[in-house]
Each structure stands twice: as C-alpha cells, then as structure tokens.
Image: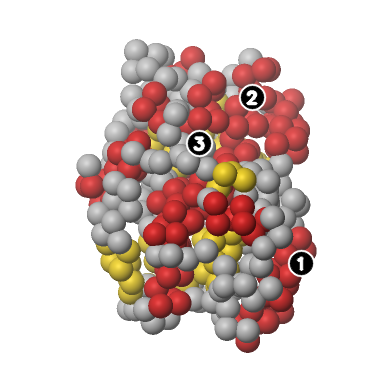
Amino acid sequence: MRNWKRLVALGVSAMMLASLAGCSTTKSETANGGEAGDKTAEASSGGSLEGTNVFMFKSTGNTFGDLMYEGFSEYLETKGQKTAYKSPAETTVAAQVQMLDELITQKVASITISTNGDAGYDEVFKKAKEAGIPIVSIDSEANPEYRVCHVNQAETADIGSYLIQAAVLITLGVDYPGDGKMEETVKSELDKYSGDEIKLGVLSASIDTPVQNSWIAEMEKELAKDFYTGKVSPNLDKKYGNDDLTESTTQAQAFIAENSVDCIISPTTVGIAAAGQALKSANSDIRLTGLGLPSEMQSFMPKSSDDNAFDSVCPYMMLWDVIHLGAVAGAAIDATLNDGFDGKVGSSFSMDKFRDYDAATYEAYQSGDGTAVLAGTPFIFDKDNMSEWIDVL
C-alpha cells in the first residue's frame, strides 16, 4: 500500500487510506475549545506555554486544521515534547498576528502556522526569529525570509490541474477514470464534445489566502492548454467564502441563482461542504468537486460502487492525508530544534515510523523564494472508496 506515496495521480494517495484507517482517535479539550492532545489541555487551563511547540491554523472550528494538529501533536509527543493548538476565532491576518505576538512573549519553543494571507506578518515573524523561535509553515506559506521551510501537502501544479480535469469530466458525466488517467481521458472526451462551452466556477477561501490562490493560478494555467480551447472557458468565475460556513453558503447560493457555471470547484473543506448542502437543497443541476473530507461530504457523494455517481451533487473529489501532513510538520520542527535541520536546499531530516507510514527521509527543495519538503501526493475519493473513509477522515 505504500506505493500510493509514489503515485502522482490526483489528490491524496491510495496509501493514505490504509494509513488513516489505523488511526487512534483519543482526544481531549484543546486551547481552542476543540479536540486534541492532553498537552494542549494543560496549556488551556492556565499553564505556561514556555517551551511548547504551537500549531496555529487559520481559525478555530475547521476540521482540516484539527486533523493536522492531531498528527502534529501525536508525533511530537512521542519525542517527549509539549504541543498546543492556538488559532484565532477570525480568519484574518490581524487576528493571527495578535496571537503570534502573545506566543512570542510566552517564549514558546516553535510555531507551525497556516497563514491567512501573503502580507502583514513580517514584523511579528522577525520578532520570533530574533527570539530564537523557529517557524515552519504548513498548508499556506509563510514568508520564506522567516520560515525554516514550508511543508507542502502536494505539488501545487498537480492540484490545480487535477481539479480542472475532475471538474471537466464531471461536467461531461464521466466517472473517475483511475489513477494517472485524468488528462488523457479529458483530451479524448473533449475531442468528441460539440456542446456549449463549459464554464467553471471556484468557491475559494479568502481573496488573499496564499495556498488557494496558488492553486487557482495553476487552474488557469491548465485551462490555457490547447485541448481546452473552444470547449472549456479559460475564465473562472471566482467567489470567496472566507472559510466561513455562512459566507460560503451565501456564495454557493449566488452561483445557483446566477446559473452560469456547470461545475463549482471548491479548494477548501469548508467551502465544498457548504456548496454541497446548498446545491443539494436547491436540487441544482450544477455539479461540484474540490478538496473535501469524506466525513463532511458523505451526504453529497456516492457511497457505493453500485451507485450512479451523477445522482450525487459531488461525484468525486480529492484531498490528501492531513493527519500525516501534520506529523511531517512535527518531524520538521523536531529536527530543527534537535538535529540541526536548517531548511536549506538539500538539507534533510528523518521521520520515524508514524502509524501505518514507514520511517522516511524528507529533503528540502527550492520552492519559490524559499524551500519546502513534500509530504505526499493527492488522492481521489469516489464511489469505490468513500465507504472506507467516512469514519476515518
């Protein structure tokens, strides 16, 4: 099953299935009032955060962030390290910056963060660096000048391409063709397509969220390929729900009211769940795909290989092993603090066996103006595997 790590097929990885299936789910209250490890519970009860490795997501109440923290805390606790989950209530740069400033004052050991924007962090990141507090970014990148490295869930270009390919095939009523067959299937299906130009929409997080914007940029590059010309519009209809359920629902309803797109792509777990409910409630003909959690999407997707996928709002979608992703970030922090990992190109760290994952080595590579390590590959959830994942992720 480990072969899934080597597949660059679509959106998560077949191995992720086995890995998550063996997950432990023992949890307790976190500093945010959610669920996570006992170490965080100690911090939330008024204990000092000095020497604690802090994980910060975009905001509270997001299962994606909760699951990443699960892996992060579990891995670091095996190393005897304390962890805490600290995220703001609002999905804004200002809210994260205020919390970061407080954490630096409390002399935390490290900060792992998924940022809410490209700009506005430099002053507080510089303060952390001067205090000797290393920063690793995950999911959404921090300024390369101040981070050790970024933990990349999957290659940005692949995610953008796969999302477009999935949306086109879904619009055409084509079942997921299998690993490695998306592009060739899109080409063959479009070659014989003679209908109206397909129009795609995107329901994203905030307008300045780095990770979603990078995926959208790759979606636009994908649409510029010759085989889409005249068959699929190169222009994406973009709306932003700010990773808030209510706002995302409002934007999904706007797509429905306008009725100008054939398929909505939502590269955010909050957005895709909101869109799924809105489309189902409206009995809309608009289809849906994107990045989602099976547990949150089960009402909008087929759950059996006997099902007609297109009776569902979302015939198939993708993601990656978010628990393992968090654990890789934990291993990067541990190596930074204890093994001399500096994030420079070619530098590497070893990660011990984690759940169903064998021990592995991760090497930093050039990524934009900074460096990153690649945690894994994407994975497609469809009618043939949804039932295996609903109780896992």
Q: Which mark is residue 23?
A: none
Dot 1 lies on which element? helix
- The answer to whether 2 is drawn above or below residue 344 in the figure is above
Q: Residues within 10 Å of mark 3 (few under 14, many from 20)?
A: many
Mark 3 / mark 2, whichever is N-terminal: 2
Residue 48 position by quadrant:
bottom right
Is residue 7 visible in the rendered structure shown here? no
Residue 232 x/y as whole percent: 51, 37
The residue positioned 64% from the left and 67% from the top of the image is 49
Residue located beneath label 2 in the image: 277
In this view, the mark in front (1 or 3): 1
Dot 2 lies on which element? helix
Residue 15 position by quadrant:
top left
- Label 2 vs label 1: CA separation? 34 Å
Q: Are marks 2 and 1 in contact (CB under 8 Å)?
A: no
Residue 61 appears left or right of 15 = right
Residue located beneath label 3 in the image: 293
Q: Nearer the viewer, residue 332 or 173?
A: 332
Residue 381 x/y as whole percent: 40, 33
The residue positioned 49% from the left and 76% from the top of the image is 148
- The answer to whether 232 is drawn above or below residue 108 in the figure is above
Circle 1: residue type: Gln
The residue positioned 70% from the left and 36% from the top of the image is 245
Mark 2 / mark 1, whichever is N-terminal: 1
Q: Which mark is residue 98?
A: 1
